[in-house]
Amino acid sequence: MKISSFFYFFNFALKTMVFKQRKPILGTIIVTDKCNLSCKHCAVNNITGIIHPYEKIKEEMVMLYKMGVRILFFCGGETFMWKDGDKTLRSLVIEAKNMGFLDVVVVTNGTFTLDLPEANLILLSMDGGREKHNAIRGDTHDLIMQNIRRASSNNICLYMAINNINIDDIETVTTIARDEKNIRAVSFNLHTPYAGTENLMLTREQKDEAVKTIARLIDEGFPIFNLKSALPYIAANKFPTPCYQCVVVENGKVYTCGRCIEEKGLCEQCGYLFVGEYTLMFNGNLRIAFDMLKTYLKYI
Ligand SMILES: C[S@@+](CC[C@H](N)C(=O)[O-])C[C@H]1O[C@@H](n2cnc3c(N)ncnc32)[C@H](O)[C@@H]1O
Ligand code: SF4
Ligand code: SF4
């Protein structure tokens, strides 16, 4: 992280904590909901199948920048399926960096060629070792490993959504993150039970077991891009929601925190670790603020 970015975030965090500001810092643009996969745990793929035009996405970038967003995520559907004429996802990343976003992150299922050296981070979903990942995501694990090894830069962070199929594979994925030269770390979420995916939910005991494993692996020095201090709050679903510092834009519509805010009762069962980490920190939990500082400086 550049020193100028660091001071921007520090200043933002301080103002948010002291003045209880509700301005956003992290924004996500959904470039399409079209996807080449149909994962068991996912409720947001191929609903409209629309690939949003370049001009629309550019307008959304400008709007987010004016709102104060400086960490920009591009997400889908499958984000790499986005294109418009000669514009590709890489063009969007470069445009965002030129516009002044300090961190630009792309979320992907990893089935496309990874040539995005301009992105600060590529969050690449891997939901287990070969067997469990393929059970959730179809037969894609080998292809993803090949794409990781052939990637043009080492800006990859694995992204695992833990559910009752893959809960025993946390260490397997973390070991891949440690051993592959193009991977910096792994970041976890717990399954969020969107309508139709409740069968994959973790019990309270399983959530405790998952966060205990993650905490142990952090202690053992594995590269994990989550905050150990936030894990007990997340297992207990004891963190404020929604996250007012996060916004999502899809087709011009702005959602506070996530599109899932419109699903009744879902926030009380939220499994997105970044939500807990952000809301606890911005509500003045200094232990988490310190942990975040340490972790972000290490991995971004
Ligand atoms: C919706 S996908 C879009 C980007 C890309 N297609 C991918 O799979 O990474 C973004 C992330 O959300 C995660 N996700 C999907 N459904 C989820 C759920 N019910 N609970 C937690 N995470 C979920 C996916 O595993 C993925 O890491
Ligand atoms: S690849 Fe991503 S968007 Fe597509 S179905 Fe899987 S989780 Fe959903
Ligand atoms: S807090 Fe609610 S809106 Fe935010 S990510 Fe979780 S479920 Fe979605």
Image (tube, rainbow, N blue to C red):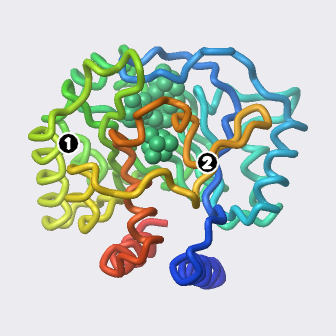
Residue density around tag 2, few if under 14, some if 14–19, many if 20 or more, within 10 Å: some
Residue 176 position by quadrant: top left
Position of 170 relative to 120 (above/below): above
Position of 51 relative to 6 (above/below): above
Q: Residue furthest front?
A: 264
Label 2 lies in ligand 3 vicinity (Cβ under 8 Å): yes
Residue tagged 1: 170
Residue tagged 2: 256
Residue 198 position by quadrant: top left
Q: Position of residue 168 (x, y in %)?
A: 13, 35
Q: Position of residue 123 (x, y in %)?
A: 48, 46
Q: Nearer the viewer, mark 2 or mark 1?
A: 2
Which label sits on residue 185? none
Q: Amino acid at mark 2?
A: Thr
Of the numbered discs 2 and 1, the one sitting upstream in the chain is 1
Q: Residue at x 58, y 35 (%)?
A: 259
Q: Position of residue 269 (x, y in %)?
A: 33, 39
Q: Position of residue 153 (x, y in %)?
A: 54, 53
Q: Name the residue nearer the viewer: 3 or 17.
A: 17
State how far apart marks 2 and 1 are (Cα).
30 Å
Mark 2, secondary structure of its residue: strand
Q: Name the residue nearer the viewer: 263 or 287.
A: 263
Mark 1, secondary structure of its residue: helix
Q: Amino acid at mark 1?
A: Ile
Residue 90 is left or right of residue 66, and the answer is left
Q: Which quarter of the rendering shows the N terminus?
A: bottom right
